[in-house]
Image (cartoon, rainbow, N blue to C red):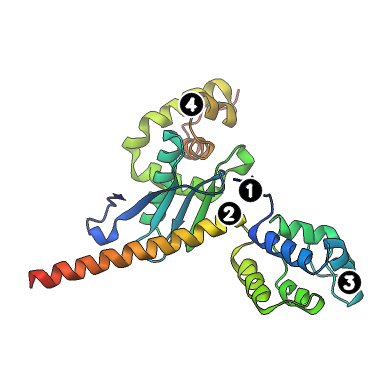
Amino acid sequence: MAAPSNQTYFGDVVSRIFRRHGFSQSKFAKEAAEQGVSYNANGAKSKRYAQNGISQWMSGKISAPKEFPSDLRKIVPLEPDEWLELAVAFAYGQDMSREDFEDLEEFWEFYRTVLASEAEERAESEAREK
Amino acid sequence: MSDQGSDQDPGKDLRVFDWPFRDPRTEMMYVSDPRPGGAAIGSALSPESRRSRLREARSYHRKPLSFKARYRVCRVAATVEDVDPDSVRALRHDIEAEPGEWAELVEWVRLEWEFYRDVERVAYETSLPLQDVVAILEDLAERGALPLCE
């Protein structure tokens, strides 16, 4: 198994989107600034361009600003599934690794199945007793 | 596998499952929804780490309103800076709820602290996870039972 990266799941999704569309963090920050959208070194929106801020969101050091997904979509032509994955990763994946995100999804699914199965057994048992 | 909670209704037991986490740094995941809460504990954990995470999960299960998150992802704390304050808070709840279970550990940490006065060193000497040591020290300090610095 490959060693888990230090990026969050959100960072991982953004990295893949950038790679797929020929962007780097600095290229994105530069183009964003040219379109009047930019982020300072603390990741807050400002008139100053800083690749550093984007890097900090992707490693989970600070939260990405809420406008970031829609700003990214203005600059990078996202496919519908890319947009969906970005939205989910932005909402749930900023404080955990990709590996943890996948494990959490799997565990959640497994646990719902366990509880549903127990509820069914209890209902059958109660029906038999009547 | 389930851990009987304080409520005797089997429908409200905390469910605990061994889980082979992909990320070796992850020790536990707890989900509060759907109810009752369920915990996935890393299958490769040491007995001390496993015990710590079970106690933590027990607190989340007992006091859902104190920990409102739908899920918790708990990772190993390699240094004091890594220790999650919510983990410490959950363990402190457990210390208050189950003093008998913790008595020996509390005394051991108190004695080691008296000698070393360093959290990470106490964790090393007791083989306890850092979050346990921090929770115990905070509890002792609150009770005025922590040896004062000279």
Q: Secondary structure at mark 3?
A: helix
Would you call the spot at circle 4 few (<14 residues within 10 Å), some (14-19), or many (20 or more)? some
- What separation in Å lies between label 1 and label 4 (alpha carbons)? 29 Å
Look at 63% across and 75% down and name the residue there.
Answer: A84
Mark sitting earlier along the chain (3/1): 1
- What separation in Å lies between label 3 and label 2 (alpha carbons)? 31 Å
Location of residue B64 (image quadrant) = bottom left
Which residue has dot 4 on it?
B126
| Numbered mark located on residue A4 in the image | 1
Residue B57 placement, left or right of B22: left
Foreground label between 4 and 2: 2
1 and 2 marks on the same chain: yes
Q: Is residue A12 above or below residue B94?
A: below
Check disc 4 and give the amino acid type: Thr
Which residue has dot 3 on it?
A31
- What separation in Å lies between label 4 and label 2 (alpha carbons)? 31 Å
Q: Secondary structure at mark 2?
A: helix
- What separation in Å lies between label 1 and label 2 (alpha carbons)? 7 Å
* Chain ID of residue with mark 1: A
Residue A29, how many percent across, how many down?
A: 86, 67
4 and 2 marks on the same chain: no
Q: Secondary structure at mark 4?
A: helix
Residue B109, how many percent across, how many down?
A: 47, 28
Q: Is residue A87 above or below residue A51?
A: below
| Numbered mark located on residue A99 in the image | 2
Contact, mark 3 vs mark 2 (Cβ under 8 Å): no
Contact, mark 4 vs mark 3 (Cβ under 8 Å): no
Foreground label between 3 and 2: 2
* Chain ID of residue with mark 2: A
* Chain ID of residue with mark 4: B
